[in-house]
Image (cartoon, grey):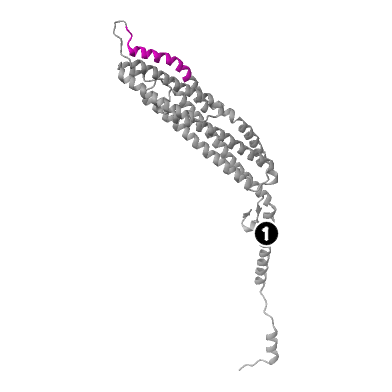
């Protein structure tokens, strides 16, 4: 058996293991890669914190702009609702002698329009109030302090305006409910009934009309009108008073028997003369009442009321346009080409 000397074993034990040239190069590249990744991570971290104010500004602009645009759109829809309701109300002007079925349809349509408008006003007001609260909670970059104040004031003006309009539309709804479908068109009776010449039917009809009119008068007296519509309520009361007076006159005449004689005027003819005279007075009242109803939905009047908001919108639009045009954007950090050209924000 071949044996080595003792000094040979000692030299083998003291010899340190080494790396090949390839292993040394691989280790060097890996170390360099770790250093680069570390530097890039540190740079990204530093840039992320450096650009925190810019990101806050961009996020603020996006949030307030979105909420603001939503508000202006909702207010525009409110004005559109006024246009629709006003157009439908005008239909009654050319249908003064409509049938009871048509009158009932006009009434239902008008009541539906007012109810829908009230719902839209309430929902819009609640949404704007919530957006105002959200604006108060979010962090406002100092650079946008003036813009924040303008938008907050705009929201408050919008809520106040909608509250005033809602008060008027509630009044309109209460008036319609007090009128009921039978008196929506301010008619003094069904002309076709007179053509029958039936004394008893006409008498019963106006006795019923008188009772209903007195009930509506009681309901109207309980309504508190907005300042701009006190005349509307008074004109409506005047219409019912005229209707009661006319019904009284007609029923009192019809309760009397016809006088005998060839040239004597019948009681129905006398009653119809009372109605004819009352119609002349009622025509004036009808025009005034229609004007008051149209005023509630008048597009021009409401555009004028919204003018103060439009001025505020123009100012805010200018500020938002300027802010977007001059707002610096957070820069992206591009990695070296050998890492695939990735971008890190």
Of residue 174 and residue 13, the one placed in the foreground of this image is 174
Q: Quadrant of residue 338?
A: bottom right
Q: Measuring from the top left, give residue 151's x and y in whole percent.
A: 63, 39
Residue most extreme to the bottom: 1
Q: Residues within 10 Å of mark 1 (few under 14, many from 20)?
A: some
Q: Secondary structure at mark 1?
A: helix
Q: Measuring from the top left, give residue 196's x and y in whole percent.
A: 30, 17
Q: Residue at x 49, y 34 (%)?
A: 117
Q: Residue at x 70, y 46 (%)?
A: 142
**In the rendered view, does 137 fall on the left or right side of 287?**
right
Q: Is residue 111 visible?
A: yes
Task: Name the residue that disc number 1 marks.
Answer: 40
Magenta stretch, main secondary structure class: helix
Q: Residue at x 64, y 93 (%)?
A: 3
Q: Measuring from the top left, give residue 120's x and y in whole percent.
A: 50, 37
Q: How many marks?
A: 1
The magenta stretch is 264-286
Q: Is residue 228 magenta?
A: no
Q: Residue at x 36, y 18 (%)?
A: 251
Q: Quadrant of the N terminus?
A: bottom right
Position of 142 relative to 190 (above/below): below
Of residue 23 and residue 285, the one placed in the foreground of this image is 285
Position of 37 relative to 277 (above/below): below
Q: Measuring from the top left, give residue 237's x and y in whole percent.
A: 47, 24
Q: Quadrant of residue 324?
A: top right
Of residue 132 and residue 223, the one placed in the foreground of this image is 223
Position of 200 relative to 143 (above/below): above
Q: Is residue 95 visible?
A: no
Q: Is residue 269 magenta?
A: yes
């Amino acid at each position: 058996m071949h044996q080595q000397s003792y000094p040979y074993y000692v030299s083998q034990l003291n010899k340190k293991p080494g790396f090949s040239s390839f292993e040394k190069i691989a280790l060097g590249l890996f170390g360099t890669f770790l250093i680069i990744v570390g530097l890039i991570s540190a740079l990204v971290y530093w840039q992320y914190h450096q650009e925190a104010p810019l990101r806050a500004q961009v996020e603020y602009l996006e949030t307030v702009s979105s909420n603001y645009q939503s508000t202006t759109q909702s207010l525009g829809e409110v004005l559109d609702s006024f246009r629709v309701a006003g157009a439908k109300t005008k239909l009654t002007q050319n249908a003064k002698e409509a049938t009871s079925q048509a009158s009932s349809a006009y009434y239902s349509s008008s009541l539906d329009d007012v109810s829908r408008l009230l719902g839209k006003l309430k929902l819009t007001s609640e949404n704007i109030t919530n957006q105002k609260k959200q604006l108060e909670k979010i962090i406002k970059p100092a650079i946008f302090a003036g813009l924040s104040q303008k938008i907050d004031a705009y929201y408050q003006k919008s809520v106040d305006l909608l509250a005033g309009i809602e008060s008027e539309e509630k009044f309109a709804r209460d008036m319609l409910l007090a009128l009921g479908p039978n008196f929506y068109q301010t008619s003094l009776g069904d002309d076709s009934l007179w053509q029958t010449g039936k004394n008893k039917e006409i008498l019963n009809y106006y006795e019923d009309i008188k009772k209903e009119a007195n009930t509506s008068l009681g309901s109207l007296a309980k309504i508190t009108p907005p300042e701009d519509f006190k005349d509307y309520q008074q004109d409506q009361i005047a219409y019912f008073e005229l209707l009661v007076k006319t019904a009284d006159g007609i029923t009192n005449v019809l309760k009397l028997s016809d006088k005998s004689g060839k040239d004597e005027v019948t009681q129905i003819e006398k009653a119809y003369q009372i109605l004819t005279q009352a119609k002349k007075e009622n025509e004036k009242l009808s025009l005034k009442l229609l004007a008051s109803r149209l005023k509630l939905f008048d597009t021009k009047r409401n555009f004028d009321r919204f003018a103060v908001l439009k001025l505020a919108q123009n100012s805010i639009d200018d500020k938002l346009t300027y802010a977007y045009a001059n707002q610096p954007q957070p820069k992206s950090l591009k990695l070296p080409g050998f890492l695939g050209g990735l971008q890190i924000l």
